[in-house]
Image (cartoon, coloured by chain):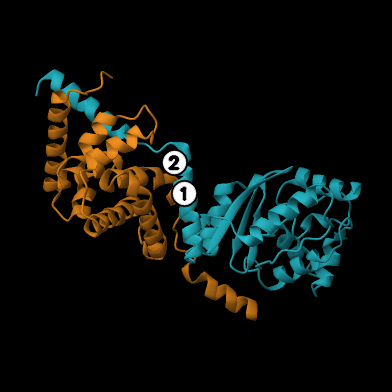
Amino acid sequence: MSKQSLEDLKSLEDRLRELERPDTPEWTRARDALAKRADAAELVDVAFERHDSPLGSLVLGATAKGLVRVGLPVEGEDAVLDELAERISPRVLCASRESVTRARHQLDEYFAGRLRCFEVPLDWQLTVGFRREVLRATARIPYGQTASYREVATRAGSPAAFRAAGSALATNPLPIVVPCHRVLPASGGIGDYRGGAEAKARLLDLERAT
Amino acid sequence: MAGRRVLRKMSAQAGSGLPPFERVVALHGPALLRFCAAQVGRERADDCFQETMLAALGAYDGVRDPGAIRGWLFAIAFRKAIDVHRARARAPESVEDFEALADGAGPAHRDRALWARVRALPEKQRQAVALRYLADLSHKEIGEIMNTTDAAARRNVFEGLARLRADLTQAPRRPSD
């Protein structure tokens, strides 16, 4: 093959590789239509959406039962989606779902200081046993108030298990909605938070201000 | 405990080591959409794309090798495209595509001449060329999908390329690029 025809072949191959790449609107349209059809066919086990908040972009995941996961910005979207795939089902798709739409609306209201109590169906499957009891007790701490790890452990039925309560809170799959930021160390200070101490302080400030 | 029972039931497909399907869509979706367009024409590409993705999502639990997802996905698309062809008698495709372009579908920078020639290739060559360059698969993968040997896959790609070069050299409307 001559040098010229080799170059022709090379450029033909390159042109083929570049051929007909869908542009963004075309791709978005196809992708959105797919999400709707997949969800209507009940092929999506976990639907998720991204939601912009004052803390950054949240990932909100829901099963058919309700909201199952609130991913905080520091966790990283990829890690949150990997966790959902690994622990619930790999059929995770960005799709709109009523529980997520409601949660998004309520989060906006919460961050605007107009909402004190979330009313969204929750799926607790990412937490079990004592950890789930701790989180259920945490969910009952009123807006603007705080509790210590020991108090929460007591309300969950095991006053001595305050360390276990700490790890339950550290792995809360539904932060903000289940307000683990309202649990503070008895010794003072702000304590740990899945979303980082800064985010925790910000949520507490918001609740104090309103 | 009721909670544990539910967890076990819901976890039937968990722990598979498969990536979230969303990542499959983001990673391979755009290439899949253009592969469908090359096989069935732009008008029916969306449908072919969605049928493929829905079938893939439905069968996703059965995937054993996360490293082979791309080939698996295009194998489904390949079969869906053949279904579309069987379901509808083929119209002269290049006419359809030039009309679509005249209506303003697709950005102007697209390589119209080459696209029309790819669409006009004999079926096996078109399939092999699209699997090689639009889907970026190996000759081995192409052979598996088309149910031929590697050598036959290689030959189909080569013959398709040779024909495209000949067509483009003779074509009066070859772009100057």
The part of the image, by quadrant, that contains residue A179 is bottom right
Q: Residues within 10 Å of mark 2 (few under 14, many from 20)?
A: some
What subunit carries mark 1?
A: A
Chain-order first, disc 2 or disc 1 = 2
Judging by the rendered image, the residue that carries numbered circle 1 is A31
**What label does residue B47 carry, if any?**
none
Task: Give the vertical position of A166 relative to A25 (above or below).
Answer: below
The residue under the point 28% across, 30% down is: B112
Q: Residues within 10 Å of mark 1 (few under 14, many from 20)?
A: many
Q: CA distance from mark 2 to mark 1?
A: 9 Å
The nearer-to-camera label among 2 and 1 is: 2
Which of B166 and B13 lies nearest the eye of the viewer? B166
Task: Give the vertical position of A136 relative to B109 (above or below).
Answer: below
Classify residue A207 as left or right of residue A34: right
Q: Are marks 2 and 1 on the same chain?
A: yes
Q: Which chain is orange?
A: B
Colour of chain A as rendered: cyan
Q: Which residue type does callout 2 highlight?
A: Glu
Residue B30: x percent and y percent? 40, 43
Residue farthest left in this picture: A1
Q: Which residue type does callout 1 highlight?
A: Arg
Classify residue A8 as left or right of residue B59: left
Task: Give the vertical position of A161 relative to A69 (above or below).
Answer: below
